Image (cartoon, grey):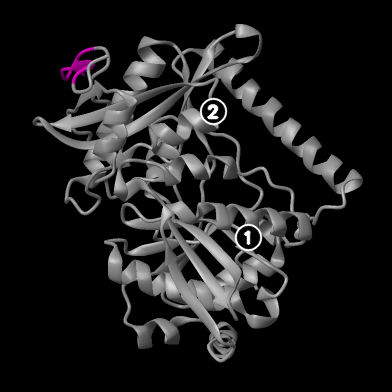
Amino acid sequence: MSATADRLVQPNTAVGHQKVAASATPAAELEMRMVSGPEWDRIVAGFDAVCQEQLYAFAVARWPAVKQEPMLFLLGGEVVGGALVMIQPLPLGLSHIAVSKWGPMQRDGSRADADVIYAGMIEALMAEYAHKRGLMLSVLPRASLAPGNGEYAHLIKRGFKRGSALMFPNRYIVNLRLDDAAQRKSFNQKWRYHLNKSEKAGLSFEHAGPERVGEFEALYQAMADRKQFPDHSAYDTVPLLMALDEPALRPELFFVRHEGELVAGAVIFKAGERAVYLYGATNDKALPLRAGYFMHWHIIRWLRDNTPANWYDLGGTDGFQGLHQFKKGMVGDAGVIEPVPPVANYASKPLAYLLGNGAFLARDAYYQLRRMAEGLLSSKARPNQARAGGDESAP
């Protein structure tokens, strides 16, 4: 497979753009190119919208049984976006579905024609995966930084149907482009109170190299054993990510120390416009010391001063009220709390939609049964956050 031009499709071919009158947004005429995994990661490292889930190195480790297809989109010979598409087999070998989680990504989200480029990428994906290959195409956009989700709205207007949704979809996103005084002022009053207390507790902050990931591992495992949280995350991919050759894609490691002892740590994805809190860990001394407040305050400042990121995505809550209160207070009045939209599914053939949607329904039922079993049979902590009206952003 060529690293630069495995598949180059000119406009108006089967994989290229198809202009459809039903689209509310004009769609750019794009070329679509499949590249190798390593080449993909190297190129998307400079994308505004790059994220962990769209990295080839992450995806092949997280979902080893799924075929990954890295697709770049070009406009006038210039790379303007891309989508890592997972070709996932359905049970009994009945068919496959094409899935793009947090994709397609824009290279430059500030372009005046960003909406047109996004529409063009969706058209190309529909042409290749739904029309040509006869698969159901599933797209999951990221949480928007503004009320409403323009990408999801476009998908629905183009004929995609609403699919699976997260139980607790809100994402808590901190504004990084404030000076220290404005940042502190933006925090919730109670969050700021705890931060002030933490700064008098004798804590110190460290930015560590990837060679110290073993120290975080020990802290994380000790926390998991102590808190008894059910862990269905991709934590086992951390060593691989910390060993990536591309510096921009390699997560950053941070620690908080008290009297010489590590009491808290965090792994942060820093590439692109939106840095992301991947994993955190604390010992039993961290809570009374308010080490989490201290650590995140210094991470915010480090990201502001050392990366081009404008936002710090804290992730969700998994239904835990304490996490909601902590993250909401940090987001304050300068950040945003917006939901990840439901999956959007499209198929041009009824059987493909029936099989693909049926597979998602079966998966959702399995996860629901697993949650129920964990609640009944496990001593692990259980979600306690209200879902009043489906809005978990309420106090």
**Residue at coordinates 59% horizontally, 76% vertically from top-left?**
291
Tell me, yes or no, if residue 123 can be seen here: no
Tell me, yes or no, if residue 1 can be seen here: yes
Percent of width and height locating residue 136: 49, 20
Left or right: residue 81 compared with residue 83: left
How many numbered badges does the structure rendering display?
A: 2
Mark 1 and mark 2 lie on one chain; the one further toward the N terminus is 2
Residues at marks 1 and 2, CA–CA distance in whole angstroms? 31 Å
For the residue marked with disc 2, what is the amino acid?
Trp
| Magenta range | 5-13
Q: Which residue is mark 2?
A: 63
The relative height of residue 139 versus residue 213 in the rendered view (above or below) is: above
Percent of width and height locating residue 35: 27, 23
The relative height of residue 289 versus residue 355 in the rendered view (above or below) is: below
Q: Which residue is mark 1?
A: 391
Percent of width and height locating residue 323: 65, 66
Please tell me whether residue 34 belongs to the stretch shown in magenta: no
